[in-house]
Image: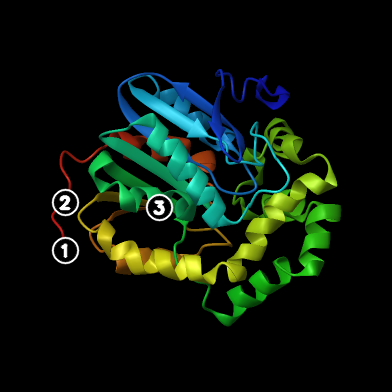
Amino acid sequence: MNELRRDATWPWPTRDHADPDGRMAVTEVGSGRPILFVHGTPTWSIDWRHLVADLSRDHRCIAVDHLGFGASERPDGVGYRPEDHAARFSRFADSLDLSDATVVVHDFGGPIALPWVLANRDRVRRLVLLNTWAWPFRTRSTRFVAWVLGSPLGRVLYRWANLSLRVIAPGAWADRSKLTPELQAQLLAPFANRSSRDVLWALAHSMLASEPFWAHLEQQLPSLRGLAIDLIWGTRDPAFGPPDLASWQQHLPHARTLELPVGHWPHEEDPDAVIARLRAQPTENPPST
């Protein structure tokens, strides 16, 4: 077990999933209808601790750390683009042989998990989207930010200033008191040395470099219509604001929306509201529109 898991913030045991690209750390807690949690950057499965603690009382909760994140390996010579993570996630999810599953995604976890969801509609009962996206960056301001972060200068800032974990992520909380020193220490632990932060920069670089991947995802979004979908949105998120929520609502007009006055991590800042929505499961999928 990785040292960063020996803490009350993540008390559950971990097993290994052997992917061709490297070992991925997996946590499974509880039994019942499965819920698969998919984290974004620059975090790991610790994001889901409040939800897992409650929902594992009557669900099989499964959380995986993407390669390079959390307690998973960080091998050299493999890809860390979102499409690479998506391929690994699909292999992992296939290994679970799931049925009637709920898939909960956040941030980069959305585009990483969506290809598997789209290819396995018959296995998925419900999709829960928290402050995520699945399309190319379009506005001049977002493309400029993406260009800076994905540039060689951005790589230097990620490596030497730990920009993602020291500046960007803390600034995305509406209530900074929820980012406790204990939690921040757990988030920093996997990226203690400079070279380890290259996997974070790889995702920043992908915001523009992986545009064909984003465009392909967006083209497939209509296939999700008819699937039970919840949008749980932190409205004070500086990264994904009201226009991104509106894009989801346009692509998936049947989705239920819960807006919360919190930042980028609704499941961290208001876990009770998120848990309540997850427990208020629809009795059946809505009709296709």
Question: Which amino acid type is shown beneath numbered disc 2?
Answer: Pro
Report the disc number at residue 286. Answer: 2
Q: In this view, does 84 lie above or below 5?
A: below
Say if residue 221 shows up in the picture.
yes
Question: Which amino acid type is shown beneath numbered disc 1?
Answer: Thr
- In the image, what residue occupies the spot 71% across and 38% down? 184
- In the image, what residue occupies the spot 54% across and 79% down? 139
**The residue tagged with tag 1: helix, strand or loop?**
loop
- In the image, what residue occupies the spot 46% across and 27% down? 52
Cβ atoms at labels 1 and 3 below 8 Å apart: no
Question: Which amino acid type is shown beneath numbered disc 3?
Answer: Leu
Q: How far apart are marks 2 and 1 (CA)?
A: 9 Å
Q: Distance between the residues labelled 1 and 3?
A: 20 Å
Q: Which of marks 1 and 3 is nearer the N terminus?
A: 3
Q: Name the residue under label 3.
A: 114
Report the disc number at residue 289. Answer: 1
* 129, 259: nearer the viewer: 129
